[in-house]
Image: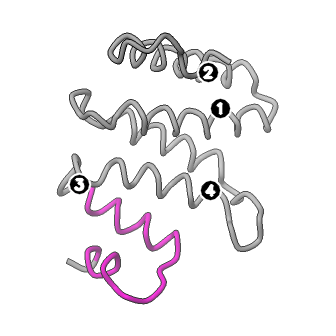
Amino acid sequence: MRARNVLLASGRRTPREEVDAYRVLAQVGPAAYLPLLARALQRLSYDTGSGRKHASALALSEEAVAVARSIDAAEPARADVLYRALDACQRELYDMGRGAEGLMMRAEMAGIGRAQAELSGVPSVRGAG
């Protein structure tokens, strides 16, 4: 109840409060709140006020990927949420000099892009660049 109140409050909430609320609500309604949690984690990893990355940006990005992967495969938005989470995480990995891990995430992104291209009939593949 408190988590819903945080999200519904008319005042400004911090990214940390948003993530904490979505973590609680994702346990109750995963289909509705896991995609929102993944996006909130990505927003938290970058401090828009100072224009700098959060100190634990990589850990937050990795958590966003784990959350996105836990979304039900039948959920239509899963591919987009996972693609965005992987993209943010692979950038963090490259920034930290962990290119091999970043490349593995890039390969997973290409796989998602290929699957989406097959389903939609559009020949362009996201993540192939």
Residue at point 56%, 50% (across, down): 60
Residue at point 49%, 44% (across, down): 63
Q: Earlier in the sequence, mark 1 or mark 3?
A: 3
**Foreground label between 1 and 3:** 1
Give residue 57's position: percent from left, percent from top: 65, 51
Q: Are marks 1 and 2 in contact (CB under 8 Å)?
A: yes
The residue pinned by badge 1 equals: 90
Kindly state the secondary structure of the residue where label 3 is placed: helix
Q: Is residue 23 above or below residue 4?
A: above
**Foreground label between 3 and 2:** 2
In the figure, is residue 98 to the left or right of 61? right
Give residue 54's position: percent from left, percent from top: 69, 60
Q: Are marks 3 and 4 in contact (CB under 8 Å)?
A: no
Residue kind at label 1, given as amino acid type: Gln
The residue pinned by badge 4 equals: 45
Q: Are marks 3 and 2 in contact (CB under 8 Å)?
A: no
The residue pinned by badge 2 equals: 106
